[in-house]
Image (tube, coloured by chain):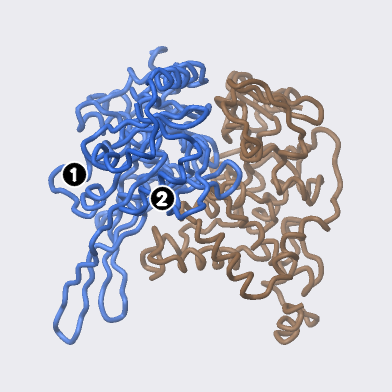
Chain colours: A brown, B blue
Amino acid sequence: MQEMMKKRAMELLADGTVTRVIGWRRGEFSYDISPAVFEDAAQIERDFVWDAFCGANVSKYLIRESAKGRVLAFLKPCDAFSMNQLLAEHRVKRENVYLIGIPCAGKADIDRIKARGIDGVTGIEEDGEAFVVHTIYGDERVGRADVLAERCLVCKSKRHPVYDELLGEEGEDLPDDARFAGVEKLEAMTAEERFAFWRGELSKCIRCNACRNVCPACTCENCVFDNPDSGISQKAAADPFEENMYHIIRAFHVAGRCTDCGECSRVCPEHIPLHLLNRKFIKDIDELYGTYRAGEDDETKNPLTSFTEGDAEPAVVRKRGRA
Amino acid sequence: MLFLKSADLERFLAAASETRTVYVPVDVEPKKSAYRKWTPGTAVSKGLKTTRSAKDFFFPQTEDLVGFRIENKKIQILDPRGEEEDFAVFGVRACDARSFGILDKVFLSEPVDTYYENRRAHGLILTMTCRRPAETCFCTAFGIDPASPGGDVAFTETADGWYVEAVTERGRDFLAPLGDLFEDRDGSGAEAAKEETRAIMKRLPLADLQTDAFGGGKTKEFFDRPEWASLSEACIGCGTCTFVCPTCQCYDIRDYDTGHGVKRFRCWDSCMYSDFTKMAGGNPRLTQKERFRQRFMHKLVYFPENNGGEFGCVGCGRCLASCPIHMNIVKVMKTLSEGQDES
């Protein structure tokens, strides 16, 4: 697949369809791959990589890149949902992006590999359903399923809701049962238990803002938490409660627009399961307003910003919310 | 040479806790550790590094500097500082131990930062050698020997315990009353363990990282390099690298309106943030490229220029492990020095 992608990128650069290509650049130890913009065939030949560690969602970069000129982006199915949501919000210039959908078998989470006690990594190779991790302390073999990112273990879809062309076989939506198991566990807790859970998790926050900055739904030009005139601007929280507020407000703001791409949890240096906040909103919206999937198309209105006669009344929300 | 058997660690920490609060690295998840106050039964992490660095003990993320209480037309000035208690940090690696020296150069030079100074005066550093360095480690590039970690007391780890040596006077005073916790052993085991660590360092993927290209007086050489544009292009402008970094020391001072007064606090700032160095007259760093460049120029050029050649990085590798897009000082150093060879 990597070679097909490189070839296609070079062709589209050569025929002038695009002037730049957004993809992933190889790192020092196999797993430390950075999103990158490529401008010529030589750069692509040398540095372009596509493998199990290309987890970063490149959609958000297209806000900036599409303003500069024609750009090619390779999108995994989950990136394509983010992309579509950005298009629906008019944040990306559609005419300036050429989208190639690429299949994804799930991305490996290096932290899960390291949690197995593996370090000193010098390289990682895929070998069927396993990874062979070369380390200075010897080789280790780990099963793919054991080190896939959480978001990939509960992957919502292998289908691309938007693309100009596809490489490889198009996939299908996957059943959602496992995706909401974590939310159901939280719902089953008492309010006190749930409060303790979130205070425990959110107290780890170092306010690096990585979750916000990576989030394809967080595209405000100036975030309320960065604006000194907002009165709630925080470079660091004055007390631990503020960190809770930051995450809760952010979750509310992306509710109905979050496609559950899982980038927030991927980038959190403290491993706070932020996706659980977003999934709770997704689950509630599905239950209260009927199944809705952000990023499915760029026309359907988000149920939280549109009104229909059949909408759940506040009393119903409260009743169903308690269930 | 003093030797502490693995089985006696609990006794040692209990004895140390009698005279001060002792903080130890604790596993909060598999292979992910954080410093916690030691209490009987606390299991000390065997991991290499805590996610956050040990700088938090001396330079916490937020700290009250002064308070003002306003009543009618009177303003009362309140000093929030209490009596600092003695504390010890156990299991500090060589990289973090060196970072204190770097922070000292910032906070203990005139005008002395008394908040920092106060904590430094009460903190005892118990360091530990690294038995299993990670691929992200490159402390040796900055002249750090992970087998001689420094601090006040250095622990050299072996399979069945630690050789223990006082490094400073304060360390000697701390160890003096604890004599019966230790065995007396011939020091050859310590030397063998140190050599093992040094041998591993030579095999790490970043063992050959060179710092020669960088240092004081090179501002003009690096400031306008075209590579900054591509290096910074994927940066999402979060503060992860700066907040896990043991040497990043920039802070902001803010006022919090309490309704009947003001609490003036400082909090870590990050050069990666869009409002970093925002002043009444505007912001000299308008795009992420300038902010990104600031971080690396500070560590590799400006800091050594102002501090006798010492770099502002200790090679702990935390930014390599935590950056959401895997851009880091190693990639910056390699890219800039490669470009130099070509020119």
Left or right, residue A262 beside residue B250: right
Q: In this rendering, do the residues under marks 1 and 2 share a single chain?
A: yes
Q: Are marks 1 and 2 in contact (CB under 8 Å)?
A: no
Kindly report the distance in space between the C-alpha atoms of the residues bearing marks 1 and 2. Answer: 32 Å
Image quarter hosting the N terminus of chain A: top right
Which one is in front in this view, the residue at disc 1 or the one at disc 2?
Answer: 2
Q: Residue furthest front?
A: B180
Image vertical order of residue B157 relative to residue B74, above or below:
above
The quarter holding residue A51 reads top right
Q: Is residue B287 visible?
A: no
Q: Which residue is mark 2?
A: B14
Q: Is residue B336 above or below residue A64?
A: above
* Residue at which label 1 appears: B108
Query: Disc 2 is attached to a residue of which chain?
Result: B
Q: On the rendered structure, is B160 left or right of B249?
A: right
Mark 2 is surrounded, within 10 Å at the Cα level, by few (under 14), some (14 to 19) or many (20 or more) other residues, namely: some
Query: Foreground residue, A2 or B100?
Result: B100
Say which residue appears at 32% left-offset and 38% top-offset. Answer: B179
Residue A106 place in picture, x, y as percent = 75, 40
Q: Amino acid at mark 2?
A: Ala
Task: Write down the chain letter for disc 1.
Answer: B
For the residue marked with disc 1, what is the amino acid?
Answer: Leu
In the image, residue B53 lies at what x, y percent?
A: 41, 43
Say if A235 sits above or below A125 in the image. below
Q: How far across and how far down the image is residue A68, in percent? A: 53, 41
Q: Is residue B202 left or right of residue A280?
A: left
Rendered image quadrant of residue B342? top left
Q: Point out the image quarter for the C terminus of chain A.
A: bottom right
Looking at this view, is B42 or B23 the one in front?
A: B42
* Residue A202 visible from this viewpoint: yes
